[in-house]
Image (tube, rainbow, N blue to C red):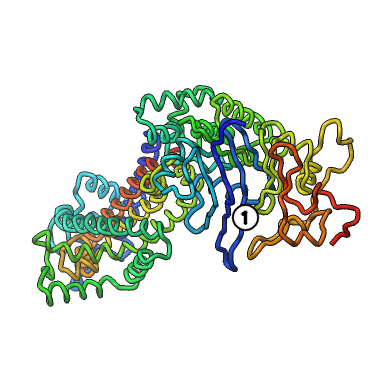
């Protein structure tokens, strides 16, 4: 197991290094960064001065090394727009995004897994049809529309919840539901399919033949095997929620990292965009690593790989 | 005769299928005494496995099981609720399945899976359960038993896994063990070993055993009683010596012709075959199910078939012919 973890950790570091190279080169893919900073009114001399000031005149390898070593010490450069260190800017916004992401994925898992299990126990029953209906509805409704409907009903008509902002835990209820409901259908369907598959397997019959209770058969013998693909999916969705909740953050005016990414792209604030891409990618890498470890714990056959 | 452990009368299993009902098992009767080995023989699809699952109460909700009588040591299995069945399963009656490769849970260690039944049914601690597991693993011939407890199924070969399955079924010293083709999925070289082991352990612990197989060679070696199953019916039952020495039903005779016998079968001679295929059991089945393949068939085979007792012990077969052979004056259908 330890050997497996070290192996995966090494792989994760290699991927992280690749991601850092890609996000570094993004700065140069979108044109000359010096003229971007200088703006439309800058003369050739101004641009040349900026180029020297920011070090764009040095060889790329040197610039990358310089960028990487400062990134490792937490210095991700300065935002062109906010004129603030990018690191502290992102750290600020990331807090909101992380709360939202953790709440969202928890909501998704806590609704999807029990519903998927219940649906698999009795296929074609009422609960199975309800689960199917909820997942189709979740897949069909765009987040921005569902979010607006919630605001109209619960914030404006009923007045139970605040429509926007992030000043108290109550503010996170509607965004959590919208974000979580978006991830729920896929998790639910995968749980249901996995359980159906596992429940018809020979070792479940063995467990029943030993006199294990239905609950023990379902949750000890079946769920552990059925949940393995769900772990991988949830990890990807968690990464997605931490990086891509731009729509939800905009609707509910939660100024998190997703919203910052959207602002920075609109403003050509390259250091911020670059740093955000790096941070979001690192999230994906971390969650993939964690899901690999969790799956290896769940399924001993994976520990060899 | 010893005292009867299991009594089955009129066991019927119906499976709803797309176009109607599959009458998979139709009114079969048999008894198993304590410490006795009953072999149920028949070809694939004859309803052997369904019968064993029906006894364990493991058929699944869609399948309709009924019986006029089904008793295990005085417990009426036809009326037993889920709780009663759970208490019996794994404790007083246990089962060994056909597929050792898939019958163990890949996520748990051998030790966890071996001790489970004992921990569920008996008031023992983990350590005692593990000690019992080691003892049984040694009994089924697994070396370094203690170190196996921490291993996972995927680290064991098929033969080892089936030994583990046998040990698992024996954990609570059941009174009845049902083995559904326990050696079919294994290498020919270890089939005999595993079977020998199972039978010896059964004798040693005085367990009754229902051994389901299509291998008549196996039956000849281990059975006390034999039940020959064809297309959902028991066509012939009796003690092993009765059925082997004086087979009455044309199907039983046909089966016995299919196996070579040392000393009797000449080198180069053709082994017997039974032409034709098993009839479809969807919709009603009347008369003798074997009549489409039988070389003794007459018109009366379409009607209800009487049970006949050739006179010795509990030997019984179902055929229109008193001796299982067509009389000279009868004309073929």
Residue at (89% x, 36% y) in the render: B266
Does residue B26 appear left or right of residue A182 in this picture?
right
| Percent x, y of residue A114 | 32, 56
Viewer-nearest residue: A48 or A235 = A235
Viewer-nearest residue: A269 or B187 = B187
Quarter of the image for residue B99 reads top right
Does residue B207 appear left or right of residue A45 in this picture?
right
Quarter of the image for residue B86 reads top left
| Percent x, y of residue A265 | 24, 67
Residue at (63% x, 65% y) in the render: B283
Viewer-nearest residue: B171 or A294 = B171
Q: Quadrant of the N terminus of chain A?
A: top left
Q: Secondary structure at mark 1?
A: strand
Viewer-nearest residue: B308 or A189 = B308
**Is A47 above or below relative to B164?**
below
Residue at (73% x, 61% y) in the render: B303
Q: Residue furthest front?
A: B311
Tell me if mark 1 has few (under 14), some (14-19) or many (20+) residues whose alpha carbon lies within 10 angstroms of its own. many
| Percent x, y of residue B20 | 59, 67
- On the image, numbered disc 1 is attached to which residue? B26
Q: Is residue B31 visible?
A: yes
Q: Residue furthest right?
A: B328
Q: Is residue A301 visible?
A: no
| Percent x, y of residue B115 | 42, 32
Does residue A60 appear left or right of residue B100 in this picture?
left
Q: How many marks?
A: 1
**Is A285 above or below relative to A38?**
above
Q: Chain of mark 1?
A: B
Does residue A129 appear left or right of residue A243 in this picture?
right
């Amino acid at each position: 197991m330890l050997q497996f973890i070290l192996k995966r950790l090494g792989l994760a570091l290699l991927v992280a290094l690749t991601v850092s190279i890609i996000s570094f080169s993004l700065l140069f893919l979108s044109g000359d960064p010096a003229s971007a900073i200088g703006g439309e009114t800058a003369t050739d001399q101004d641009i040349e001065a900026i180029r020297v000031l920011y070090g764009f005149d040095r060889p790329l390898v040197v610039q990358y090394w310089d960028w990487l070593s400062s990134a490792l010490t937490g210095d991700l450069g300065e935002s062109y727009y906010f004129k603030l260190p990018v690191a502290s800017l992102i750290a600020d916004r990331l807090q909101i995004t992380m709360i939202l992401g953790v709440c969202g994925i928890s909501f998704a898992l806590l609704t999807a897994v029990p519903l998927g299990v219940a649906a698999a126990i009795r296929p074609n029953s009422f609960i199975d049809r309800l689960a199917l209906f909820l997942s189709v509805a979740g897949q069909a409704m765009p987040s921005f529309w569902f979010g607006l409907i919630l605001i109209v009903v619960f914030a404006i008509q009923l007045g139970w919840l605040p429509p926007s902002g992030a000043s108290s835990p109550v503010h996170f209820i509607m965004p959590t539901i919208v974000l979580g409901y978006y991830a729920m259908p896929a998790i639910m369907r995968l749980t249901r399919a996995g359980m159906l598959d596992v429940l018809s397997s020979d070792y479940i019959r063995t467990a029943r033949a030993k006199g294990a209770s239905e609950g023990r058969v379902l949750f000890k013998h079946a769920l552990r095997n059925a949940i393995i693909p769900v772990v991988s999916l949830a990890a990807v969705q968690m990464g997605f929620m931490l990086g891509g909740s731009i729509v939800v953050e905009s609707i509910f005016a939660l100024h998190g990292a997703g919203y910052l990414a959207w602002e920075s792209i609109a403003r050509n604030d390259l250091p911020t965009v670059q740093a955000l891409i790096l941070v979001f990618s690192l999230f994906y890498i971390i969650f993939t690593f964690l899901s690999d470890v969790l799956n290896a714990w769940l399924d001993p056959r994976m520990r060899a790989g | 005769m010893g005292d009867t452990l299991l009594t089955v009368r009129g066991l019927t299993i119906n499976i709803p299928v797309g176009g109607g009902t599959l009458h998979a098992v139709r009114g079969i009767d048999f008894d198993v005494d304590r410490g006795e080995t009953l072999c149920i023989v028949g070809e694939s699809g004859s309803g052997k496995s369904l019968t064993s699952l029906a006894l364990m109460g493991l058929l699944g909700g869609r399948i309709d099981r009924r019986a006029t009588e089904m008793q295990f040591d005085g417990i009426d299995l036809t009326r037993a609720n889920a709780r009663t069945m759970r208490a019996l399963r794994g404790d007083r009656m246990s089962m060994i399945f056909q597929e050792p490769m898939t019958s163990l849970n890949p996520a748990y260690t051998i030790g966890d899976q071996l001790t489970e039944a004992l921990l569920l049914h008996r008031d023992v601690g983990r350590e005692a359960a593990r000690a019992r597991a080691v003892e049984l693993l040694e009994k089924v011939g697994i070396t370094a038993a203690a170190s196996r407890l921490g291993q996972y199924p995927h680290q064991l070969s098929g033969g080892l896994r089936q030994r583990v399955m046998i040990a698992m079924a024996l954990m609570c010293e059941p009174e009845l063990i049902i083995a559904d083709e326990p050696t079919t999925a294994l290498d020919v070289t270890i089939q005999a070993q595993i079977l020998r082991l199972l039978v010896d352990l059964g004798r040693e612990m005085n367990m009754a055993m229902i051994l389901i197989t299509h291998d008549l060679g196996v039956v000849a070696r281990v059975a006390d009683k034999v039940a020959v199953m064809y297309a959902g019916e028991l066509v012939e039952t009796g003690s092993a010596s009765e059925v082997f020495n004086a087979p009455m039903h044309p199907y039983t005779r046909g089966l016995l012709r299919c196996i070579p016998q040392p000393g009797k079968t000449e080198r180069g001679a053709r082994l017997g075959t039974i032409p034709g295929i098993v009839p479809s059991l969807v919709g009603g089945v009347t008369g003798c199910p074997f009549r489409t393949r039988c070389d003794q068939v007459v018109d009366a085979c379409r009607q209800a078939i009487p049970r006949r007792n050739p006179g010795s012990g509990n030997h019984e077969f179902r055929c229109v012919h008193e001796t299982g052979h067509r009389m000279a004056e009868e004309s073929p259908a």
